[in-house]
Image: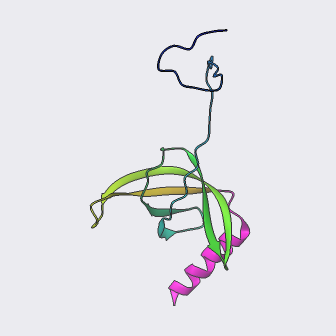
């Protein structure tokens, strides 16, 4: 029977990882859309995102949540009235669903009048 070193209180065996081991951390935060087009959006977010990373964005289209992938093209930290930092994220849509494109077109049509 192997003795545990002092201070090691793990009850299960752990294994050393040799090489790269990738993982996924998903955080859900509400962000405000500042402006939007068929190719992307500028959002005001409480959290930053890695430049050139691909993020899953969920938008509401006619009461339904629609997920779409977007690449972070630029990021800028801004100071909010609350004192907590906020971030403007420029997102490029990657193959947005037709329902999202139709909603954007309806928004654009409503603003032209």
Magenta-span inclusion, residue 35: no
Is residue 49 toward the left or the right of residue 105 in the image?
left
Point out residue 68 in the picture as x, y percentages from the top left corner.
66, 59
Q: Residue at x 52, y 85 (%)?
A: 112
Q: Count how many numbered circles sit on residues in the image.
A: 0
Scheme of colours in the image: rainbow
Q: Residue furthest right?
A: 98
Residue 108, magenta (yes or no):
yes
Q: Is residue 63 above or below residue 44?
A: below
Position of 12 relative to 27 (above/below):
above
Q: Is residue 19 above or below residue 102?
A: above
- Please tell me which residue lies in front, 101 or 58: 58
Residue under the image location 27 percent in, 67 percent down: 81
**Which residue is more in the foreground, 16 or 5?**
5
Residue 87 lies in what quarter of the image? bottom left
- 25 or 59: nearer the viewer: 25
Q: Which of the pair 68/31 is nearer the observer?
A: 31
Magenta segment boundaries in residue numbering: 94-113
Residue at position x 56%, y 56% from top? 92
Image x and y of residue 26, in percent: 58, 49
Image location of residue 2, percent across then percent down: 63, 9
């Amino acid at each position: 029977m192997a003795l545990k070193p002092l201070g090691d209180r793990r009850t299960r065996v752990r294994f050393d990882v040799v090489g790269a081991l990738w993982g996924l951390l998903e955080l859900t935060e509400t962000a405000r859309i500042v402006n939007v087009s068929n190719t992307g959006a500028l959002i005001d977010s409480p959290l930053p995102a890695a430049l050139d990373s691909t993020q899953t964005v969920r938008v509401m289209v006619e009461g339904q949540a629609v997920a779409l992938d977007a690449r972070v093209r630029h990021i800028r930290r801004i100071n909010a009235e609350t004192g907590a930092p906020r971030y403007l994220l420029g997102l490029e849509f990657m193959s947005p669903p037709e329902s999202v494109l139709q909603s954007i077109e309806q928004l654009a049509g409503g603003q032209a009048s």
